[in-house]
Image (spheres, coloured by chain):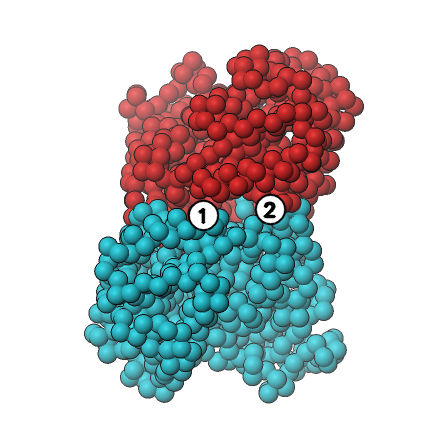
Chain colours: A red, B cyan
């Protein structure tokens, strides 16, 4: 709820303070900053500021506090939870131009970057030195590291390599007061005081503005191989996944695509996914060449127990690339199939994958809502994709109810309403089902000590 | 500062509430709970309670709040920072008997334990299922998981496998108000709200009482090999370490022992460490057999560049065990050499290892204080060991000044005053050098929202 807004005089002082090239205020210019990658949310901000210094950020924080405005830090706006959707009184603080790689420290295997550097740039810089930055969100080509930190982004390599949190060694953060913190260091171990850094990771821009990020890099795996396995039922694919984990095999990726997703991909960007199958698994093993070969053999043995329709092994980089490209267009391919496409993001314990997928199918029939599913199956992270139509109120009501039932079932299975997209606007209503009253209160208390005036991205995660 | 203490009447109510077998109050019984593994601290508590239920813990929290007492959760008391040293008005809450393994979930590769379970028990349970729990603090045979969580314990495998934080999936925590939180789940990814779990890890019992811990297990490495390399200078060993990291080789352990430590070990538990060397590196590679063999070859190539006096490879488990046993008695062996032995715990970026070790040598001569050094070198975590004498005030003053200079130099190099032992009582004075004023204030604010009455382990980390 925005009760007050900046006065015309206040807006004048804002416009006067910054050069024209740093501030967008015209209606048309604000349009691209009125939404993120989440369907259904749209709200133009008051202005967009491209700060050129820490001092600019400190100034705008003070201005916002004095003038009933709030601040929304933004990278590329690829959030899938509405975390980067403005309020009417928001100043969008675009960090996209803070895109310098500040240091690559080969001796400590670290990289220090500004928050606007893309995930892909970090991956490429690491690669040049035969190093590896594993986090790999779907939007890696344009998503920024600042946004990745804000959402604790994951991707396809979570099961073996973890998520953004596991690679953040240090953060420079500007608090709403304008105070500058440096949290962390290049050390591999640090037990000095509470881990403040971890509070900011995944906080969706609600606690502080990240202005530098120190990341850990790891040795680059020498080799990779990819298996494509197709199944006649969704459950066989889910059970095969659980069996692979149970066998303590941890491939570098273990992706799942259901028939709807496969069909869309094949229409959009044909990759030879077997069309007659109900589900495919795309499994990658990486590491030492002999270790990869041995792991592939073990995985194939497990897969055979679940009656696959077909199994292909892609040993050549080109063939692998083609499969991965197909997988990575899954959302774009599905997005073409309906006027409004909602990408969800539950995660469940890996033993519960078959049950969760069964439940999604059942909910889909029950509500008459079309749901495609693709998943980072190996880490239990499912993306149910709702094919809907914003103009159809009746359908949207069904989608809402189906979605809620899926969230509640994921929680019941010991899961979470979001594995990697964050809560944002889209899921804040459901967060209270995952946390008990005290836990929820604690989240709010932390927001309150860090941002007592509710200046930073208010209304996200919780009200 | 303890201004008030419980009245006799209050103590009576405490004694009346619990069965005799659950409460220690006699002077002699309190002695073992008056100190931890840190030299120089000693303070008997008011009483020791062995709670038999969550309700007992909730009761004692209320009682402490009403009666000017405080609560000190304790596992095996192996803390090396004085984190488990009581105040006069402390009730020690011994969680040592909460030592049940509650669930091993082979399908999700997790283990749920009570906080009093030892690190070794978790390692052994994992091993039975061909799984692996890597954190391996020096006191692993008796240290408890609750204590490991409280200190974010590390050990020798930090460089490849990380520390306790990297394995904690969930925590049941009792807040000072008695409220019960469950933070985390069996999911490999979770972006739902701030990571409260990470606040409690490493909080040294100052924010909540951990009553259950859910840990992640990983596949057990198939094979291991150990290299013992000796050098004629400390710096050569330090530079060889940095070079190994620079070559993006990440062995499972990379330990360093200086001459003083080697001599003590050889007197205490002869393992054939070469006596004529100034420093040895003990390097372990683990994983797929061929990957291990190849990694060993690469490591040997790097080592050769630093003119080692001697290199041995221990391929046989028995030989490896002997070397590791010798390494693991390092502190016990050194502890015999002086009336008071202080084990410190700085960590520096790995590029700064040679410089830090040079500085420690220089400080040792400058102050006339004997300092041995052993280190988890591969993750930059150095343990300078001060051979001192508590009865010798003049010497203790020099030790204090030398120690402070070492801490400040580690911070100057971008390091931390504690890699894995925590801050406790021993280092709280120095924490303010590592954090700026705002960061320090933030630590205190977090304590205040979680423990407004300062009931839980007051006076640790900061005042």
Circle 1 crowding by C-alpha within 10 Å: few under 14, some 14–19, many from 20: some
User: In this rendering, does residue A98 appear at all?
Assistant: no
Q: Nearer the viewer, residue A127 or A463?
A: A127
Q: Nearer the viewer, mark 1 or mark 2?
A: 1
Instruction: Kindly identify which numbered label has been placed on residue B290.
Output: 1
Instruction: Kindly identify which numbered label has been placed on residue A248.
Output: 2
On screen, residue B295 above or below B416: above
Circle 2 crowding by C-alpha within 10 Å: few under 14, some 14–19, many from 20: many
Where does the N terminus of chain A fall, quadrant-wise?
A: top right
Q: Is residue B272 left or right of residue A353?
A: left
The chain that hosts pointer 1 is B
Q: Nearer the viewer, residue B360 or A10?
A: B360
Give x and y (percent) for residue B180.
Answer: 67, 56
In the image, what residue occupies the spot 75% across and 19% down?
A368
Give x and y (percent) for residue B30.
Answer: 59, 82
Determine the image quadrant of residue B233.
bottom left
């Amino acid at each position: 709820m925005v009760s007050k807004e900046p006065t015309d005089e206040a807006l004048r002082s804002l416009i006067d303070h910054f050069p024209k090239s740093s501030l967008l205020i015209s209606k048309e210019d604000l349009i691209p900053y009125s939404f993120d990658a989440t369907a259904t949310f749209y709200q133009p901000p008051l202005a967009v500021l491209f700060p050129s210094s820490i001092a600019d950020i400190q100034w705008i924080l003070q201005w916002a506090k004095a003038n009933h405005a709030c601040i929304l830090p933004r990278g590329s706006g690829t959030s899938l939870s509405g975390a980067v959707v403005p309020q009417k009184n928001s100043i969008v603080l675009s960090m996209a131009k803070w895109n310098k790689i500040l240091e690559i420290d080969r001796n400590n295997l670290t990289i220090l970057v500004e928050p606007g550097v893309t995930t892909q740039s970090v991956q490429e810089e690491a690669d040049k030195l035969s190093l590896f930055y594993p986090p790999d969100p779907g939007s890696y080509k344009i998503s920024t590291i600042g946004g990745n930190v804000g959402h604790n982004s994951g991707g396809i390599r979570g099961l073996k390599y973890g998520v953004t949190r596991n690679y953040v060694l240090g953060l420079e953060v500007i608090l709403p007061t304008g105070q500058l913190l440096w949290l962390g260091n290049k050390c591999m171990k640090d037990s000095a005081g509470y881990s403040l850094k971890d509070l900011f990771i995944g906080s969706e821009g609600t606690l502080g503005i990240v202005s530098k990020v120190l990341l850990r890099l790891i040795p680059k795996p020498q080799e990779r191989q990819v298996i494509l396995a197709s199944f006649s039922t969704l459950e066989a694919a889910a059970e095969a996944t659980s069996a692979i984990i149970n066998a303590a095999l941890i491939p570098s990726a273990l992706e799942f695509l259901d028939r709807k997703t496969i069909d869309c991909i094949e229409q959009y960007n044909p990759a030879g996914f077997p069309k007659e199958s109900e589900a495919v698994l795309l499994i990658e093993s990486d590491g030492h060449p002999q270790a990869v070969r041995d792991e592939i053999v073990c995985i194939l043995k497990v897969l055979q127990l679940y009656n696959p329709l077909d199994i292909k092994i892609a040993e050549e980089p080109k063939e692998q690339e083609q499969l991965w490209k197909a997988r990575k267009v899954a959302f774009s391919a599905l997005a073409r199939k309906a006027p409004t496409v909602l990408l969800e993001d539950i995660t469940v314990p890996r033993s519960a994958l078959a049950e969760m997928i069964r439940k999604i199918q059942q909910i889909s029939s029950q509500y008459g809502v079309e749901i495609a599913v693709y998943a980072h199956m190996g880490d239990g992270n499912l993306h149910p994709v709702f094919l809907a139509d914003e103009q159809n109120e009746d359908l949207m009501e069904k989608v809402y109810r189906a979605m809620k039932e899926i969230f509640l079932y994921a929680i019941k299975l010991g899961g979470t309403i979001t594995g990697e997209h964050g809560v944002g606007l889209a899921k804040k209503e459901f967060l209270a089902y995952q946390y008990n009253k005290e836990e929820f209160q604690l989240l709010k208390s932390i927001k309150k000590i860090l941002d007592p005036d509710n200046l930073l991205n208010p209304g996200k995660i919780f009200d």
